[in-house]
Amino acid sequence: MAAAIHGAMMKDKQHHEQAHDHPVLRVATYNIHKGVQGMGPARRLEIHNLGLAVEQMDADIVCLQEVRKMNHREAAYFPNWPVQSQAEFLAPLGYEAAYHTNARTRWGEHGNALLSRWPIKATGHMDISDHRFEQRGLLHAELDVAGHPVHAIVVHLGLVHGSRLRQVAQIHGYIKRNVPSDMPLVVAGDFNDWGLQVKRMLAGFGLFEYDEQPLMTYPSRLPVVQLDHVYARGLTPCGWMVPRGRIWRRMSDHLPLIAEFRLRD
């Protein structure tokens, strides 16, 4: 499995590094479905496979959604449930991990995580829940990327269209308060949206996506919509891909989205 992922990802990375005479910043976003696939007695633990997948993406910044800090029921059900939180477990050797809980349930809690090859200088969080039936939040990290400050925000928006629009407005307000306008910024995650209104709102705030064509990420077994996005400002896009194949279909109900950028001089 690891060899197949590594071959596909490294071929793409080498292509972009050959096209430019300096390295690129690779950003991945992935909804990992809490590390478990299936339901009931047939459900299976995928967190170990996800660990291999995250490592082989070779991304500088990995934005994760539906990450469990703990879950007592699943820990009791699966004998090989990791002792660490999922964010810490999934972080490749040498990476730093940031996590913040969005939702608390009877058995545990889960939220967003950010894994970074570069030092994390500071983190922030805001609750963007729009109603009591969905607990949502954003995770913010300020990174030192080879001496350049870069801000990254991980989001997981709601299932209701009106909620998503209000949440995007909240994200905009957070950015205005907490991210200097001249700083490079990435906003990535599961937007739960397949229309254009969220994209247009974000463009109005100066956040854009690489617009060659939609890259379908959901459902992973037969992707027909793009729910996962990477928006950026102050960065030059130079690559965009969604890994495909049986190994990716089995690990989560989403496929990861990977984007590459060059820092502007």
Image (cartoon, rainbow, N blue to C red):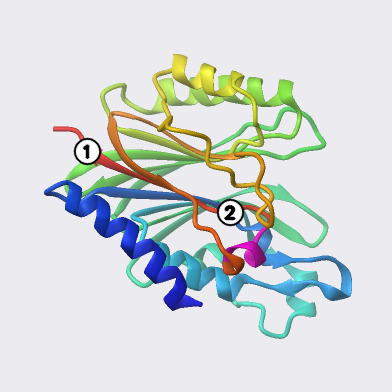
For mark 1, give the secondary structure. Answer: strand
Q: Is residue 80 left or right of residue 216?
A: right
Disc ID at residue 255: 2
**What segment carries the magenta color?**
248-252
Pinpoint residue 86: horizontal percent, then vertical percent.
Answer: 57, 66
Vertical comparison of 215 with 131: above or below: below
Magenta portion: prevailing SS class: helix
The answer to whether residue 85 is visible is no
Q: Amino acid at mark 1?
A: Leu
| Whether label 1 touches label 2, CB < 8 Å | no
Q: Is residue 89 left or right of residue 236?
A: right
- What is the crowding at mark 2: few (fewer than 14 residues within 10 Å), some, or many (at least 20)? many
For mark 2, give the secondary structure. Answer: loop
Residue at 82% from the left image edge and 37% from the top image edge: 133
Residue at 49% from the left image edge and 68% from the top image edge: 53
**Residue 210 colored magenta?**
no
Residue at 49% from the left image edge and 57% from the top image edge: 243
Disc ID at residue 220: none
Residue at 65% from the left image edge and 31% from the top image edge: 194
- The residue furthest right is 40
Name the residue carrying label 1. 263
Q: Quadrant of residue 184?
A: top left
Pinpoint residue 137: horizontal percent, then vertical percent.
Answer: 61, 38
- What is the crowding at mark 1: few (fewer than 14 residues within 10 Å), some, or many (at least 20)? some
